[in-house]
Amino acid sequence: MRRIRRRSGSAGRLVLLASVVFLAGACGGEGGAGEDGLEVVPIGFAGPLSGGAAYYGRNVLRGLQMASDEIAESGGFMVDGRAHRFEIVTADDRYLPYETSTAARRLLQQNQPAVILVPHAGGIRALQEINLREPKFLLLAYSSEPSILEAQNPLMVMLPPRFDGYQEPFIDVLMPRFGNRLALLGTTTAYGRAWTESVTAEWTSRGGTVGRDHGVDYNTTTDFTGAVSRALADNPDVLFIGGPSQPTALVIRAAREQGFGGGFLIMDQAKFMEMLDIVSMEALEGAVGVYPQSLYPTEGTPGWVARYHERFGQDFQVPTSEVAINYQGLHLVARAMELAGTTTDPEAIRARIGEAARTMPDELRIFDMGGVTDAGHLTRAVFAAHVLNGEFIAVPIPVPASTQLR
């Protein structure tokens, strides 16, 4: 992999826009050399670009775009003696699993990508039904839902940490500090329901009590006052909340305005630094959630954050884990293609993902990656954050025993 070159914010945005193809033009497999002389390799994205989850989908896409641009600007990655770059081809599935398969088939028909990324569990399950058929493709799965690993799909790589590693350390922090009564107010998506079930099981196993499920759809609800009022009627010590960052912050605001002084157990989709655009650090006191990406304690983070702001501007939103994990994921694919000696054989590329993870350059180590399990999970060292006296306190998240490398 070649040295990363930096680019000023305005120029970077122009490259960013140029690097994305919204189902325009067919570039099957390797699409030939582009104007820059680099061989073009299509990478598919089937995810939400409209509707309530569009902001989330565009964060995922921003990570892919940033990595794609950096690779091109550095002269590409080498396969079979030729320099290559990526071209991101996208299809909007509106966060609807039944549309993900249609979107992926359009990408395969028009662009023939060997790799397609999907950023939600329902869509990932839908593509697990087709990615082992011809034309085969490597499914990059951006979801922390552990059930997607049950398929044992040999052409899938799950990029983020599993969410079932979070509940135990979250509760270790919150129950002793606030008490053992929990109210449920998570999003009602399939992902949110899985989180709710996992939190409920872990909380009750510790002797805690759980109130009724007051969950609402965070993607469509705009006024959370009533839902929060019903949840607080259970007299909880801790509220389980979470969905996209912006509505999650509105839930926190409503809870504080109604006098709630307890803690928040926040599912991993919501991000602290995005919520701080809506609520104060004081309102977040006692919350536990994923560690802010821009503050992550790894060697590659400071340089990556600097490059992010150089590309998008200092005033642009803070970089989140959606950006970081998918950014690192695309660099991982490039490295695996180099090691495999192919950009078109998904089985050969998948076989080298583990080695690629272990040999990533330090400047790309935003997370320390260990390798890939037999089920396809890319393991990584991660932290949560506990807001204590106005500061983010790191909480290590152990890798669940079932995902340890063999």
Image (spheres, rainbow, N blue to C red):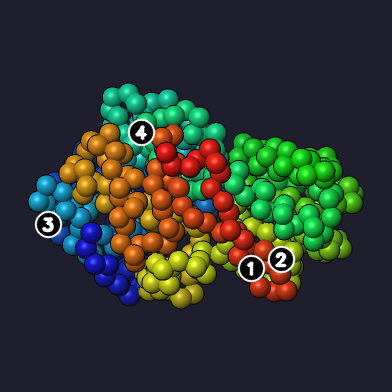
Marked residue nearer the N-terminal end (4 or 3): 3
Mark 4 to mark 1: distance in Å? Answer: 37 Å
What is the three-letter code of the residue carrying label 3?
Gly
Q: CA distance from mark 2 to mark 4?
A: 40 Å
Which residue type carries mark 2?
Leu
* Residue placed under numbered mark 2 in the picture: 284
- Image quarter (top left, top right, bottom left or bottom right) of the C terminus: top left
Tell me which corner region of the image, top left, top right, bottom left or bottom right, holds residue 45: top left
Query: What is the spatial separation of the Cα atoms under label 1 and label 2, in whole angstroms?
Result: 13 Å
Q: Residue at x 50, y 29 (%)?
A: 150
Question: Which residue is identified by label 4?
Answer: 155
Left-right relation of 367 to 334: right
Q: What kind of element bears circle 2?
A: loop
**305 above or below 161?**
below
Residue occupied by mark 3: 37
Instruction: State the CA–CA distance, disc 3 to disc 1.
Output: 48 Å
Of labels 2 and 3, earlier in sequence is: 3
Residue 393 tag number: 1
Task: Tell me the kind of residue under disc 4.
Answer: Leu
Q: Residue at coordinates 30% horizontally, 62% vertically from top-left? A: 361
Badge 3 marks a residue whose secondary structure is loop
| Of the two numbered discs 4 and 1 in the rendering, the one whose residue sits closer to the viewer | 1
Asked if the residues shown at circle 4 and circle 3 are in contact, with their CB atoms under 8 angstroms apart, the answer is no
Q: Residue at x 43, y 72 (%)?
A: 302
Instruction: Identify the secondary structure beneath mark 4.
Output: loop
Q: Is residue 14 above or below residue 25?
A: below
**Label 4 Cα neighbours within 10 Å, binned few <14 / some 14-19 / many ≥20:** many
CA–CA distance in space, label 4 to label 3: 30 Å
Judged left or right of residue 308, residue 352 is: left
Q: Nearer the viewer, mark 1 or mark 2?
A: 1
Q: Earlier in the sequence, mark 4 or mark 1?
A: 4
